[in-house]
Amino acid sequence: MQKSDRSVIARLNWRLAAVLLVLAAAFGVVACTSDDPTATPTATSAPAAPTATPEPGATMAPEPAAPTATPTPGVSDRAGGTGKFAVRRDPPANFDMMATTIWYDLNQMGAPVWGSGNLVRPCLDDVYAVCPALATSWENNADFTEWTFTLREGVQWHDGNPLTAEDLKFWLDLVFEGYSSSAGERAPAWYGNRMGEYDSTTIVDANTLKITLKEGNPLFLDVLFTPYFTIGHPRHLTEPELQAGNMEVAPLDVGMMGLGPFVFQSYDKGSVMHVTANPDYWETDEDGFSLPYMEGMDFAIMTSPDVMDAAIRTGQLDGGSPGFGYILTKPRYEQYLQDLGDDFFVVRVPSGFGTGSGGGLAWNLLKEGPWQDVRVRKAASLYIDRQQSIDAVAGGFGLIGGLLNPSNPFSNPDVLTWPGWNPDTKEADRAEAMRLMEEAGYADGFEVTYNCLSTGAWPDRCEFLAAQLAGLNVTMTLELMDAPAWTAAGQTLDYGAVQSAAGISSHLPEPNEAAFLPYSESKAAIVKHEDPSVKGYFDRLKATNDFEERKAIWQEFEQYWLLEQYYGVPIAGNLAHIPYRSWVKGRLHPPEQIMSYLDFATVWLDK
């Protein structure tokens, strides 16, 4: 098991004591201190290359990261305590991951209940590798169109009902096909087409099911293990609702029933959600002790990052939110250092890269306007100062990259030498941008509407882009929207540009396919286009399981998207700093993919 990092930090700060007394009354918590940690911070290592998919016909049955033997009698000395963690806002869509692309808050509160992953999940010691979860082994046929999974025995829903192959078939059908009956229709999950061209799921026997794809995909597992493809729709509770005509049925409507390490107890909207340890959870630690360690968790919905910081610094909360706007800025981080010394640490995770998902500029090329001219799109890319955006929108902790985290093994290593990305050539790049605008006939600029998420730190990103484009005489009108409206609007053709309604959500290329596809194949794609070449790149990616070949194809596509067609303009991604008190142990640190390891099964409190 990976132990949590510890950073440096010295004393408690009571300047916001009045606010914290209110928090204490609301959540029933008290301030506390811990022994000074003695370990030094552990540096984040560079990502390893993803594990290759097996050869055709091979059986894939890696050992789980944590043993699954019968729990050792007795209780681990790590067990006990109730963790208290901040969430930036109420999850959207009644906790329905199938219905919304706004997954930060939803997955933070949902993963402990549903568990990490599904049939498979990222390995606990390697976020790029696939490990067993609800399946213990699997095999594929020669052309990668059939994937057969052997299910883990003895897994139960939180109400005691056993998990069956029928449950998993129901979930997969709901993801890929939705639901249709005389009572109505339910759309497939928004991420369904990211998982491949589905044909069907067949129940082979009580512990075996076979997923059949219309097109072979040697990297199906690498897509399936995306952390937010979680199972929150139990068949025995969801299906009756659908049969009764409730096509919008969501996890919260059926009591947040799950398979994960924690059991849902209560949810007070705008205040707190409480979960308790699942006594029948299937996973154990390396010593055979049952997981999870904690007796429960409270997720406190905070009104602002300042209130969150004050609550953490005074011990009212054990840790913070991974959501944009709540991850630490440099000034806030320095305040933690000043106030706490060695009594806190941060989990650092690069996140929010690529066109759209980093808050960048993504064009709607199917709406008539100047942006249909590649010279105009190139001018915008050359003019925007990405380095400036680190302080302006990433709080001082940011990284400049292409479509993925710059340290990702798939990323082009020379991104910072590209025109528009290279800070040393910014003056020349801007002069070229002005020339291109004049050549295209838009020296006086133009107007464009930009769909902008109204919550958290997203408006800051929109305003930064608007201010930057003003230098090209472009007037960007911001259309501020809440999460449901923003997601829905991003699937239409009624705007000129957008942050994105379905941005980069995986650290591997293939799961992001639907974010780039033509509009006719993916309504929630980042950029609205009908460029057949884009589909061609992903067809090539899915035709090989050779890592070096995949890397070469992705880097070719990245240059086509960003440097030839200028379909989007990424700005700085975040280097997320998520704060925790030093007594929080066992918090796993992904080198990227901020949604990983949020079930907190391995976390304990040493206080």
Image (spheres, helix red, strand yellow):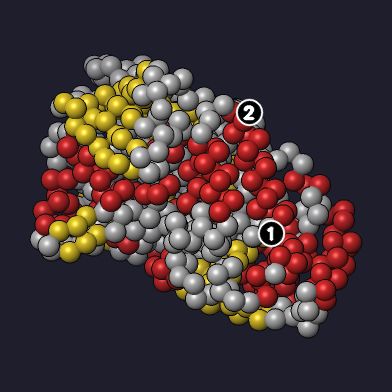
* 178 or 544, nearer to the observer: 544
Q: Secondary structure at mark 1?
A: loop
Q: Is residue 319 above or below residue 542?
A: below
Q: Which residue is at 71% across, 78% downward?
A: 474
* Residue 245 % position (x, y): 14, 63
Which quadrant is home to the N terminus? top left
The residue that label 2 is drawn on is 548
Crowd around label 2: few <14 · some 14–19 · many ≥20 (10 Å): few
Could you tell me how far apart the alpha carbons at marks 2 and 1 are, in whole angstroms? 25 Å
Which quadrant is home to the C terminus? top left
Q: Is residue 164 above or below residue 566?
A: above
Location of residue 231 by image quarter: top left
* Residue 599 % position (x, y): 37, 39
In the picture, the disc for residue 90 is none
Q: Which residue is at 54% across, 61% downward?
A: 530
The residue that label 1 is drawn on is 566
* 380 or 579, nearer to the observer: 380
* Residue 309 % position (x, y): 53, 55
Q: Amino acid at mark 2?
A: Glu
Q: Is residue 507 visible?
A: no
The total number of labels drawn is: 2
Q: Amino acid at mark 1?
A: Tyr
Q: Which residue is at 44% across, 56% downward?
A: 521
* Residue 580 % position (x, y): 51, 43
Q: Is residue 193 visible?
A: yes
* 448 or 531, nearer to the observer: 531
Q: Which residue is at 63% across, 34% downward?
A: 551
Crowd around label 1: few <14 · some 14–19 · many ≥20 (10 Å): many
Location of residue 572 by image quarter: bottom right
